[in-house]
Image: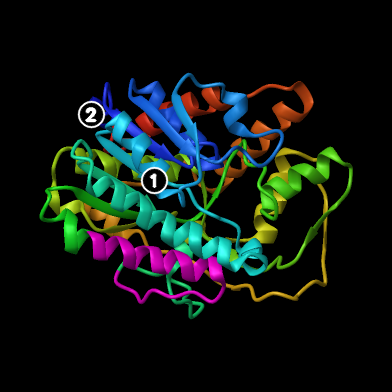
């Protein structure tokens, strides 16, 4: 897997207590990496990180605390960093814009500044978002060459994060032989996400409380993908950086094929098909701006990295629904089982990283 390059590597994951970060820490551990985690305490109960109970070294800190951040990374001396720590919720960014900007932008500045002075770090992947593009409701999806922008504070902060990374790459890391890249994924779903104001976690809570879900924008279209598909892209990109392939130190999209873009309603119908206990109704709350159509074009990753999705939309929603169904009805955590199913399906589909 990934040329076995992660085995015995010291890999730092910021935001490891979050949804994507916890899945990434699990996958890295399965490959024999020495995983280190920096993050805040999980902000939900239950949460995927606590359920996994992984045996890794971790520190609970705020990435805006530059001094502590630098001290901890200096002790750990990682070979590589995956930076996922962020304020990731669009609607919360309207309520707490200063928190969003300071975490997403200055948190990234702090991380890169710390890594700049730690000679062990040679590869960094910063995870931003498909929402970093200036959105004109472009149906075919945005490429890495499209203009950055953002209406809400979250989206704009992710565009600003891309500029921070580009500046650090050109100003410092190119001279220090440190390879720095960014990764932009689609709307990621999968078991273990309990974030507030996200479609699938809200759907799960509605089942647990026996209350129908309120849906604001049923016809909004997004590039939905399973969390493992996005992580396979991050890990493949990380492999290239660890192999010292300079050409890959740039921005990359990792999203589904355009035919897999789907509306909120489509996703809910698919979840319901695999978990009939779930129900919803349309809300009339239109108080905040929401993009109707958002997509990313991942042709560059498919051509230059030979990356591709393994699970289509139906498989992504099926596995997501089944993960939560097992947890809610049987108190079972199927992360390891689903990861193995994903790897088996990836092998059958002939992915480049196996």
Answer whether residue 154 is magenta in the image: yes
Q: Is residue 286 left or right of residue 102?
A: right
Answer whether residue 98 is magenta in the image: no
Mark number for residue 5?
2
Q: Quadrant of the C terminus?
A: top left
Looking at the picture, how far across and down is residue 5, in whole percent? 23, 28
Looking at the picture, how far across and down is residue 176, in whole percent? 12, 50
Q: What secondary structure is marked by label 1?
A: helix
Residue located 20% across and 43% down the image: 241
Q: Which residue is mark 1?
A: 67
Mark number for residue 46?
none
> Mark 1 or mark 2, which is nearer the start of the sequence?
2
Residue located 87% across and 41% down the image: 209
Mark in front: 2 vs 1: 1
- Which SS does the magenta portion mostly show? helix
Looking at the picture, how far across and down is residue 193, in whole percent? 62, 41
* Residue 165 visible in the displayed image: yes
Looking at the picture, how far across and down is residue 265, in whole percent? 70, 60
The stretch of residues the image draws in magenta is 145-168
Looking at this view, is 300 or 172 the one in front? Answer: 172
Q: Is residue 192 left or right of residue 4?
A: right
Q: Residue furthest bottom?
A: 136
């Amino acid at each position: 897997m990934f040329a076995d390059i992660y085995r015995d590597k010291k890999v730092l994951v910021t935001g490891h207590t979050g949804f994507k970060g916890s899945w990434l820490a699990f996958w890295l551990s399965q490959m024999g990496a020495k995983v280190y985690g920096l993050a805040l305490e999980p902000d939900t109960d239950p949460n995927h990180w606590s359920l996994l109970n992984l045996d890794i070294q971790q520190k609970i800190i705020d990435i805006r605390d530059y001094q502590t951040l630098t001290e901890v990374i200096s002790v750990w001396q990682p070979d590589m960093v995956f930076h996922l720590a962020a304020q990731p919720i669009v609607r919360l960014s309207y309520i707490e814009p200063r928190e969003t900007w300071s975490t997403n932008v200055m948190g990234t500045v702090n991380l890169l500044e710390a890594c700049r002075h730690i000679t062990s770090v040679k590869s960094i992947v910063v995870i931003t978002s498909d929402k970093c593009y200036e959105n004109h409701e472009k149906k075919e999806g945005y490429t890495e060459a499209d203009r950055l922008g953002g209406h809400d504070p979250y989206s704009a902060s992710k565009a600003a994060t891309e500029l921070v990374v580009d500046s650090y790459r050109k100003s410092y890391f190119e001279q220090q032989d440190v390879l720095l890249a960014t990764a932009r994924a689609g709307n990621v779903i999968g078991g273990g996400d309990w974030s507030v104001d996200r479609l699938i976690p809200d759907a799960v809570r509605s089942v647990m409380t026996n209350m129908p879900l309120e849906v604001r924008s049923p016809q909004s279209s997004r590039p939905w993908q399973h969390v493992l598909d996005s992580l396979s892209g991050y890990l493949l990109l990380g492999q290239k950086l660890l192999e010292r392939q300079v050409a890959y130190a740039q921005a990359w999209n990792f999203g589904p094929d355009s035919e897999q873009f789907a509306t909120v309603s489509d996703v809910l119908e698919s979840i319901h098909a695999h978990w009939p206990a779930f129900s919803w109704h349309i809300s009339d709350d239109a108080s905040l701006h929401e993009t109707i159509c958002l997509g990313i074009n991942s042709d560059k990753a498919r051509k230059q990295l030979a990356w591709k999705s393994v699970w289509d939309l139906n498989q992504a929603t099926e596995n997501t629904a089944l993960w939560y169904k097992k947890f809610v009805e049987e108190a079972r955590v199927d992360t390891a089982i689903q990861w193995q199913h994903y790897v088996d399906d990836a092998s059958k589909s002939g992915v480049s990283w196996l």
